[in-house]
Amino acid sequence: MIKKIENIKKFGSYQNYSWNCNKDFSDFNLIFGWNYSGKTTLSRIFRSFEKHKLPEHYELGTFTITRKDGTTYTEKSLSAPLSIRVFNEDFIEDNFHWKEDASAEPFFILGEENFEWLEKLKEKKTECEKLQKEINLTQEKLDKQKSTLDEAYTNKARDIKQNLMIPDYNKTKLIKVVDEIRYDEHSNILDGKTLSSTLSTYQYTDKRDEIPELSLKVPDLQSLFSEIREIASEIIDTQTIQKLVEDPILNEWVREGVNLHKNDESVCKFCGQHLPPETLPRYLKHFSDNYSKFLSKVRDYINRVSELRDDLILVKIPDKISFYQNISDTAFDELNTLSQQKLEYEKYLSYLIEIADEKINNIFKIIPFGEIDFNQSEFEGHITNVNHLITKNNERTQRFETEKENAKNTLLRHYAGEFIVDSNLTQVNIDSSGLESSLETKEETRDKLKKEITELSAKLEEGKIGADMVNQYLKTYFGRGDIVIRSEGDTGGFQLYRGKDKAYNLSSGEKTSIAFAYFMAKLLDKNTKFDETIVYIDDPVSSLDSRHLFNTYSLINDIFRRNDKKQPCKCKQLFLSTHNYEFLCLSLEWFKKIPSSSKSTAYYLVQKSERESLDESVIKDMPKTLRNKNAEYGYLFEQLYEYYIEPSGELEHSYCLPNMARRFLESYCSFKYRLDFGDGAIKLIPDNQKRERVIKYTNYYSHFPDYIHTIGMADLSEGKDVIGIIFDAMKQSDLEHYTALETEVRSNQPQSQ
């Protein structure tokens, strides 16, 4: 939301303006000013942000605006993220084209460039239709050629499927192979002998499973024998009990009993009798620590050797049938030899376990045993040889699938090569490629044309949709539906109609209404986020009669007002400026009814002032007299009276004084005498010389908007004298009325005055 305009320099009639208003801009902002006071110039500052450029002839102007959040923007930052829409005379000029004879041209999306769009649309449609016929003919040729080729592919694929017994082989797979060899088909065609050999390899099915490699842990048997030899001959150093030495079973039984009585040596757990105190110590000397350590040593040996034997038993030597038949018989002798040595090795391990068990049962005796005769290195060599045999067999199994697959691929390439030659595929593909390339080019051109046609049609169609909205607003403006815009058939344009006839010589008020209807249609279309948009409407009424003026006010009121104290404005922010006092009064009445109006509304007056012989526009707070009254008459009297009593040194009053004096006299003569300005002045001011002076002053200086005539204004005393003549005439004509006006003005002035 915009807070204020900090300054404006060299921008039209704003030469060196700085913000001096008591209240910043609000949600609803009402700006009043007579013609040529600077209202439209002010709107052009806002439109600069909408168009992202300065208007023509304003390139040297500078200005600074401030947002509510403190952000400032200048003429150098017109691409600022401000969503602004402005209705003013520039909008009308940019969006509508009127002939010199004042007849209404087709407008809205039409105009010169839109007729170009329509012509382009017709040309592109004709071109697209012609191109589509060519595409259809090319497609028919290509489809026929492809159909013949597809049939050939299907037949060949069926033959390959039957010959090689490949259940899922089809045309698609054949095409893939053909594509792979299409530029080298002859080198892939086999001679008779090679074809027969390759077929034999492919059809061979005697595949063997892979054999697991032997994983044998073969510890040194001599080392194990040396270990058991030491155990068998070892005698434990302990105080033995002969009875236990002679009876191994009793010895073991007592040993277990001693372990049970270590923590309770008073009573025998077997018979329940008290143990003599010397009994347990004597047994403990027999079953000493040396005894226990030796026993654990032997048992550990038994466990290790048993585990080796069990692992060895689990290893199975593969049978001859598991290998391919063409492996030599000498190689198979390795299997038999390894099996025999494995059994012998297992036998020796079992023998070592038996010796260890016997030593446990006769722990106080030396156990005799025989020597072994086993070739450890030869056993390990046979294991290596058998594993080599297994590897050789497995490699063949692995290679079996590869060789079979290679044979299959060779045969597939052979048959594909035959197909290429037999079907003259190379030439067929050349022809098809040419047709496809031509078709692709034509389709790309056609699709591009269709896209352009769609875009052009969318632009024209958008105009039709907008026209419906414009007609709705026109009906609201004029209170009837006789002024409408209609589509001109296939031309794509729109023409204004009054009833059944085309509308020509439209009044300026009607043109303004139509332009504003179009503005509102664009403002509320899908491309505008209305609640995020700042809207500036400058003079939506110009020369309309009172009914049309009221309709315009009602439409603006309905579109922008929301009965919500927090967000009373439907758009982001509304600026409404006018020179029409009736419209001002209607707007003042509306603004006063807005929820929280003191916070949501702001009122301003745009005037011309004269400084150093230069006319300048200024923005001021709207005077209370003007803001609080429902008639322009009282405000004009107040302005004339204040200048008459104390002429302003800044001459802001003097610049507008002729215009204000004339408007005041027009109003006075109208209600007092029911006469126009000329006849009313004769009746009010009988003195010809004084009357002529008033008429010359009010007519000459209130009808020239250009700078040259304003330079030639009379001196300051002229305005004061003319006002004095008018006031004296009013006192003579109607003193009571004049006194009432004077009293009201003085009551509005500060006490110091």
Image (cartoon, rainbow, N blue to C red):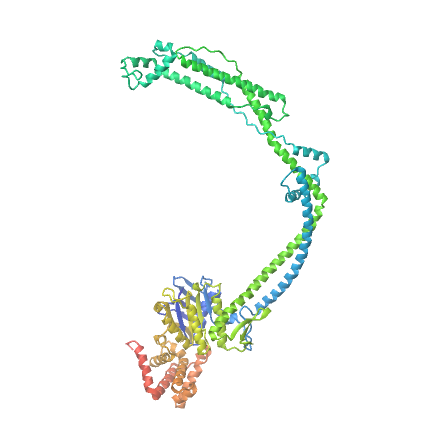
Choose top left, top right, bottom left or bottom right for residue 530.
Answer: bottom left
> Relative to residue 172, is residue 195 depicted above or below?
above
**Can residue 217 be seen?**
no
Residue for point 55% across, 18% down = 340
Give the residue furthest to the front. 271
From the image, which quarter does the N terminus lie in?
A: bottom left
- Front residue of 392/49: it is 392
Q: Is residue 116 above or below residue 430?
A: below
Quarter the C terminus occupies: bottom left
Quadrant assignment, res 287: top left
Counting from the top left corner in percent of width and height, residue 681 is at 41, 87
x then y, percent, for residue 572? 42, 65
Residue visible at 68% across and 55% down in the picture: 138
Q: Is residue 669 visible?
A: yes
432 on left or right of 471? right
Out of 314 and 425, give the one closest to the viewer.
314
- Expressed as whole percent of the image width and height from the top left, the position of residue 752 reads 28, 76
Q: Nearer the viewer, residue 624 or 521?
A: 521
356 vs 426, nearest the viewer: 356
Q: In the image, is residue 377 above or below residue 423? A: above
Residue 432 placement (x, y as % from top left): 68, 50
Question: Where on the picture, by quarter, is residue 262?
Answer: top left
Vertical position of residue 164 compared to residue 499: above or below: above
Figure disc tally? 0
